[in-house]
Image (cartoon, rainbow, N blue to C red):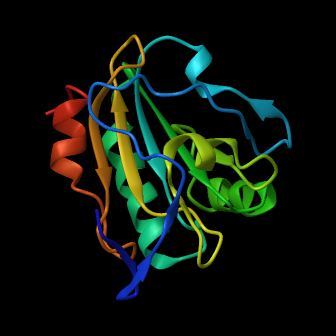
């Protein structure tokens, strides 16, 4: 799999995931600086790996998922980035976010290690989307080939049973 960041090839650290794998348990930090384990709760999940909420494409992506999820509660959406929790809290406030659990991997890099999403060249997470069923089995995996591009929203929503 070839991933690029602004046209330049990048190296993803760790093992990437595939459809049929079980999404690994991972620990990230929420906007209150508390460690959380999103996979501990049962239920369908969309897990988004984004480089930074302070970039246009990441903010646009999360905004679109906010819109997609506004009238549904059967799928939990979790975003993970290397952003500091303070930046995530600011984004949440600016976008009136009450639907997406925005989390940071800055402290532990646990998510990055277990999902193969950390770009060696810049220390950021690549753009990726994972959809799990109620038992944590991956039904959809997308490592976006160019990090500055958006994920395939239709396929993500379809895999989550929302289309």
Quarter where residue 140 is shown = top left
Q: Examine the rendered structure and indicate whether residue 118 appears above or below residue 74.
A: below
Residue name at image x 69 percent, y 42 percent: 110
159 displayed left or right of 61: left
95 displayed left or right of 106: left
Q: Which corner quadrant holds the N terminus?
A: bottom left
Quarter where residue 149 is shown = bottom left
Q: Residue furthest right?
A: 33
Residue name at image x 39 percent, y 72 percent: 147
Q: Which percent across, then down, holds residue 30?
A: 75, 41
Q: Residue furthest bottom?
A: 7
Residue name at image x 80 percent, y 59 percent: 86
Q: Which percent across, then down, holds residue 134?
A: 37, 12
Q: Examine the rendered structure and indicate whether residue 123 appears above or below residue 113.
A: below
1 displayed left or right of 56: left
Q: Which corner quadrant holds the C terminus?
A: top left
Pick the front one: 129 or 16 = 16
Q: Examine the rendered structure and indicate whether residue 138 appears above or below residue 94.
A: above
Q: Which percent across, then down, holds residue 43?
A: 43, 14
Pick the front one: 117 or 88 = 117
Q: How many marks?
A: 0
Residue name at image x 21 percent, y 55 percent: 152
Q: Which percent across, then down, holds residue 64?
A: 35, 55
84 displayed left or right of 147: right
């Amino acid at each position: 799999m070839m991933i690029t960041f602004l046209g330049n090839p990048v190296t993803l650290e760790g093992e990437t995931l595939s459809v049929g794998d079980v999404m690994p348990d991972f620990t990230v930090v929420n906007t209150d600086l508390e460690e959380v384990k999103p996979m501990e709760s049962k239920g369908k999940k969309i897990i988004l790996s984004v480089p930074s909420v302070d970039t246009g494409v990441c903010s646009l992506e999360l905004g679109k998922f906010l819109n997609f999820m506004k009238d549904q509660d059967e799928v939990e959406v979790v975003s993970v980035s290397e952003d500091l929790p303070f930046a995530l809290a600011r984004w949440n406030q600016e976008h009136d976010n009450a639907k997406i659990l925005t989390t940071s991997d800055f402290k532990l890099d646990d998510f990055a290690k277990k999902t193969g999403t950390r770009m060696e060249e810049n220390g950021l997470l690549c753009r990726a989307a994972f959809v799990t069923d109620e038992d944590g089995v991956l039904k959809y995996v997308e490592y976006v080939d160019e990090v500055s591009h958006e994920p395939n929203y239709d396929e993500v929503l379809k895999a989550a049973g929302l289309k």
